[in-house]
Amino acid sequence: MIVDINSEKILRDDGVNYLNCDRGWKSWAFTLDHKRIGIMYLAGILLCFLLGGIMALLIRAELFTPGKLYLTEDKYNEFFTLHGAIMTFLFLIPSIPAAIGNFVLPIMVGAKDVAFPRMNLASFYLWVAGAIFFLLALGLGGLDTGWTFYTPYSTTTNSTVIAATMGVFILGFSSIFTGLNFIVTINKMRPAGMTWFRMPLLLWSLYATSIIQVLATPVLGITMILLTAEKMLGVGIFDPELGGDPVLYQHFFWFYSHPAVYIMILPAMGVISELMSVFSRKPIFGYRFIAYSSIAIALLGFLVWGHHMFLSADSPLAAVIFSALTFSVSIPSGIKVFNWLATMYKGSIRLDTPMCYALSFILLFGIGGLTGLFLGALATDVHLHDTYFVVAHFHYVMMGGTLIAFLAALHYWWPKMFGKMYSEKWAKVACLLIFIGFNWTFFPQFLLGSQGMPRRYARYEAEFEGLHRVSTTGAMVLGVGLGLSACVLGHSLWRGKRAPRNPWGAATLEWQTGSPPPHHNFIGKPVLTDPYDYDDLVFDEEEGGFVRRRRRSGSEQEKPIKEPSIV
Amino acid sequence: MNSNQNELQHEEYDHHGLAHVMPVKLLVGVFSLLIFLTIITVLLAQVPLGPWEVWVSLGVATVKATLVCLYFMHLRYDRTFNGFIFLSSIFFVALFLALTLMDLNGPRVPLSGIE
Amino acid sequence: MVMASTTEEQDHHGHGHVAHHFDSAQQQFDAGKLGMWLFLITEILFFSGLFVAYAVYRVNHPEVFIDARQHLNTSLGALNTVVLLFSSLTMAWAVRAAQLGQHKLLSNLIILTLLCASVFLGIKSIEYSHKWGEGLLWAGAYTYGSEELVEQDKSAAKLAATAVLGAPAALIAVVSGAILVFWRKRLSSVVRTLVAVALGMGAIYFVGVGIGIIVEVLTHSSVSHEPGDHSISQVAGEPGPGVFFSIYFTMTGVHALHILIGMGVMLWMLEKSLRFEYGPDYFGPVDFVGLYWHLVDLVWIYLFPLLYLIG
Amino acid sequence: MVAKAASSKSTEFGEGANLMTFSIMDFVIFGSERSMFFPPPTSSTAAEVDSLFYFILWVCVVFFIVIVGVMGYCLIRYRERPGVKAEPSASHNNILEVTWTVIPGIFVGVIFYWGFVTFLDLRQSPDESYEIQVEAKMWNWSFTYPNGHVDNVLHVPLDKPVRLVMTSVDVIHSLYVPAFRVKMDVLPGRYSHTWFEANKVGSYTLFCTEYCGTKHSEMLSKVVVHPSGEFETWLENAANFLERMTPVEAGEILYQRRGCAQCHSIDGSAKVGPTFLDAFGSEQSLMDGSRITVDENYIRESILEPQAKVRVGYRPVMPTYQGQLKDEEINALIAYIKSLSEGSQVNP
């Protein structure tokens, strides 16, 4: 190995990176740089998260009392509809893949960019267009169909369904473009040395996610087209009045929307796999099993959509088959959890903020996954279907899972994205608040559900008041926690101290380049190493972060070298 | 399936530059075969085959589709992975179709039959 | 637009046609090809929704399909199949021409493909306008068999529909014709050819319409129904022929839309090929557009028997 | 531990507190009559559903404790300490992988099988079931009994299997009786079925659980379980109320039973539809600008073809009652509405 002095100089002296390499709004609006697109995505989805979150708080506030507090029933229905639609289509689905993944994936495979940079930018602008349609739906009298747009209600209600369905259609393309880009990038742009089984597990999970995005999303597209045609022309395919079948719509919708749940959770699992290993200073346990389980979840995820219709159609046979398939998905998820725990064994566990989030992910996702068993089992589902039990379950999976993992990823790659360190102390406080507030909000909802409180109710029976109040109070705590973490991260942008290249001592490629990285990601070529081998990474005071030690045979004392170096 | 390895295997075979070149004879041959099959299906449609009709005409269609894929779309000479993802998409369509049908031929009643 | 993005950007400091983030032309070509195939499977799943809808209604109400099918004109369908297959041949040949750098041949083959597409749409328009006249429309607008439809306003309606559907083609033909007549001198040879091709497409669309009308007249007997037969009229709330025509129109409509998109992309490609941009070391776009075009053909290969033959 | 967090915090809320503290106790003694999870089981199938629920619950609790335990142990035992590096250990172990694939596999297998067997009981109604027709519309239920009596409350006999044949006239609804652990979607254009056998006299809430628009959360009704013997007599009286009562009384009952009350107030407050108070004889302007006086004919027409003459300021959302109300029933309603207007004397 030769240390490449020049590249080192460049990186030490001029602080040129993708953020400051060129200026002006044009350099962002027309950028083809995956990092900048990722950052724009990040800003966008955070705004949408804020919007959806505010709606959530308004909903919880209304539910503080059984009767009317301040929202009419129609307004309440619009709020929970848009809360669901915005959180699902504008936040959760693009959250980790499009924002974090876009930034990290090409650097992780040591590429200069994704395979199709223009398509990547197009994906972002399609996302913006979709968001605008949603805002239109919100502005033009509001949407009150529930995020599932079930027919025939959605075809009869005189609210702005068409704007929303068009928005969903466009967002579908945005999602497809991202997935397509990732598959091609991972397939064709890895450096020769990086075989499939030397990829970081995040890449495996993003690959699995992309498969779902490419295979399932088009069906959502045609569904939305048919729904629009239904509303505008009366193409009676879903409308019983014209001899159509509303349950067929549910099949179409869930053929996408159930796999979509895995679009949301798989990348989260990928992130956790990375963090558990890095912060335990241990190679990830059962690499192949975690990798395969990602693919297994992606494929099995296509077979279970029917469990949203256990009570819709009259065919018990179908229900039984779908129930069996549903349980089959729980196994690979379990495998992942156990492997993560095994990774901690005999490690040297450092509780930095990302790790705190990762651990709360395991707990919350654990609860979310386990409560799925109640809903997968036919007999109990009959009682729990469409009650608050379901609400609690999917919030534990989607929010306790995806959102928490998203926050973990954000705190983990934040120094890489912006070159700034945030305040560990306050970030941890926020993490704790979020964890407490989350359980405080959603655990009571399991009880509400099993006691028979139906979902999507603007008014409710007095008997449920106690638990609803507990839940609402928790929601406020949760809100405060999220607000705090936003402040912590925001504050770091101008007050935070300069981030080293490798603050966590991680071994994946993105930590070999500067924080923030240069325009073309690497100066010179990155050194391919085992993504989970931490032996040679030592903390370097002068650098303020970890650096790779040169491997030496024999007792000759070891001298740390700075990456990147050319092999 | 590291792409770099596959390239080498694909280099032999009458590759011209980046990909395989189809001889004109083959193209025209495939085309005339397709036309022939089209005529066959139209004729078969006149013959009453009862329940088999669907399967016969879909069968012929599948043969045509295969020809188009293998030759017009170069799948026969293309990277196996491309063919694989194409087939997998067919598999998922079949899945979609099968499970939906299984659930949806339950009993129906016209609205008029309610009172 | 998807096409545009699957063909890699010419990077300023990149060399020739290889974008800066690719190591080699081969890597770039393979990436593009894989991307295109992935896009094709999204197309397949997009159409799959319609096929599933078809299957569900066919299984649950075979009788409806058997009656309704009588109203589709098999000969027109078969004719269109042949046209489309031929356009696939020219497209596949075009790819070869690009690979071998036969620039003239390439441009001519693309033009031929475009003309076929135009004919296809012309013939389709006759099918549509016939259905329109008979009131054989999707469930919401299905009026077939109701007495107030008299023969002459039927034919009037058909004429009107034909005119409406043909208007865009006519407009294109007239405009491009005018441009050729008045600004001929000012146009570069490439643009001139493009405009000429547009004129040709506009014109040949009506050849398609003509053929369609002739076939329609000749085979009218094969459409076995006398006006006002109620065997297949719509009853509210019951799956009637309306649903069949809903499926017919969505399926063929979405397919026709793909043809239009394909034509647009091919014009863009023609412009490049007229500038001799494609050759042995760079023919990705031609190959990818070809794949797309063949997929549109594949869909039709299944639509034809499902809609026109079975029943 | 989460539940505790919630409960300790919940003390400032009266009901919340009791409920949650009870709950913590019950958490230890699952399945007691007063469970933190369920309303008391009051149907023949409910107990079975509950025991499956508790079985799954125990499985979850055990697995969760294992996860938390292992995590906690590692966090304490292997936390980062200066000078202590991660000890090298195997990075994979197939026996272990197989174990934690197979063991959960067995558990979910059992859960699936149990759920599936019980589900078949929930779906298969006994042949000798007493059949009641259910019709759902935005936003009320109507139950039609074998003798033609229509009611908006579901009355059922004790210890007798009751089969519901359900359909909807507009959008998808779903019938849910928590006390019976019974739920089934109610679809337009087709019939769906469910059944139950109530084994405890009383009155239980019935919900709509498929989102169906504005008043979805008010689309509630009751299930009244009559002691055996009393049901028939109730049905007898309920059916011939028209004969037994004055038109006004009968009209009031119809107003309650047939869902008028959902949208038309009798206290002058405007709901989805106009109020009945002082409606009769009043001058009203319609959507088309014309004005009419509310008289017998207008009321009758509005019941049979609601869309024909819609008053200004109201959406044309009322479903028709054509063929659902007998003439004498309509007359009774008219008489009732009359009685709600000052100075309008009721003619027999």
Image (spheres, coloured by chain):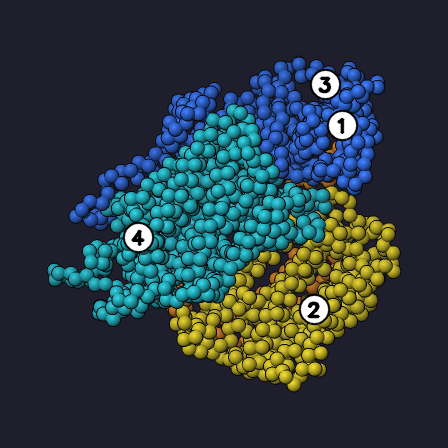
Chain colours: A cyan, B orange, C yellow, D blue
Number of labels in the image equals 4
Which residue, given by chain and number where applicable, does mark 3 sit on?
A: D238
Q: Is residue A3 left or right of residue C29?
A: left
The three-letter amino acid code for the residue at tag 3 is Ala
Quadrant of the rendering where the N terminus of chain A is positioned:
bottom left
Is any atom of residue A117 visible in this view?
Answer: no
Discs 3 and 1 lie in a common subunit: yes
Q: Of circles 2 and 1, which is in front?
A: 1
Pointer 2: what residue?
A: C120
Crowdedness near tag 3: few (<14), some (14–19) or many (≥20) residues, C-alpha within 10 Å: some
Q: CA distance from mark 2 to mark 1?
A: 64 Å
Mark sitting on residue A496: 4
Residue depicted at x 65% and y 60%: C254
The disc numbered 4 marks a residue on which chain? A
What residue lies at 83% left-to-right and 51% top-to-bottom?
C145
Residue C249 occupies which quadrant of the picture?
A: bottom right
Q: Is residue A496 above or below residue A57?
A: below
How far across and how far down the image is residue D89, in percent?
A: 24, 48
